Image: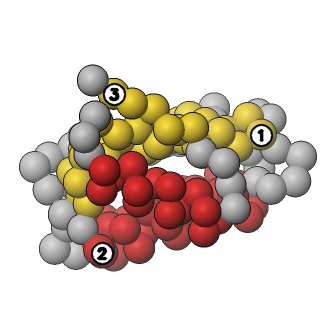
Amino acid sequence: MENYVVEGSKKTPAIKLDKRGFLKIGGRSIHEDPDKFFKPIVDWILDYCNAPPSKTTTVDILLEYFNSGSAKYILTILQILTSKLAVGHNLKINWHYEEGDDDILERGQYYSSLLKKEFTFVLDG
């Protein structure tokens, strides 16, 4: 398994999926075709979850804005991680938001509640 890295752009988030257990998604996510963008990410995560190399996986979500198509995939990714790494694994999810950005904070709180998984909310700036 290789690491998976995508440079961010004005419409796509930066993605860093490190096989040692560090996953990071950050920036803006306003794709015209989210299926095409997120499919290899979902595939990588499914493969990773089959044999995680360490006892801890740390996920950092640093999105400043994402549309409904991206929201679906962020939830899917978090669902895969929380369900497949539920037993005998330490999954840490850090949800970053900026001061005054209630929309991003509330989205993270909603995902945390929906997944019944405690997130760490990190105030940036």
Q: Position of residue 25 (x, y in %)?
A: 39, 45
What residue appears at the point 27 percent right and 23 percent down from the top-left corner? 125
Q: Earlier in the sequence, mark 3 or mark 2?
A: 2
Q: For numbered disc 1, what is the local secondary structure? A: strand
The residue pinned by badge 2 equals 69
Residue type pointed to by label 3 = Asp
Q: Earlier in the sequence, mark 2 or mark 1?
A: 2
- Please state if 79 lies on the left or on the right of 104 as rendered: right
Query: How far apart are the two marked residues, 1 and 3, measured between alpha carbons?
Result: 24 Å
Asked whether residue 38 appears in the rendered view, the answer is yes
Q: Position of residue 46 (x, y in %)?
A: 63, 62
Residue type pointed to by label 1 = Asn
The residue closer to the viewer here, 120 or 16, is 120
What residue appears at the point 75 percent right and 61 percent down from the top-left corner? 84
Residue type pointed to by label 2 = Gly
At label 3, counting other C-alpha atoms closer than 10 Å, the crowd grade (few under 14, some 14-19, many 20 or more) is: few
Q: For numbered disc 3, what is the local secondary structure? A: strand
Q: Position of residue 96 (x, y in %)?
A: 40, 38
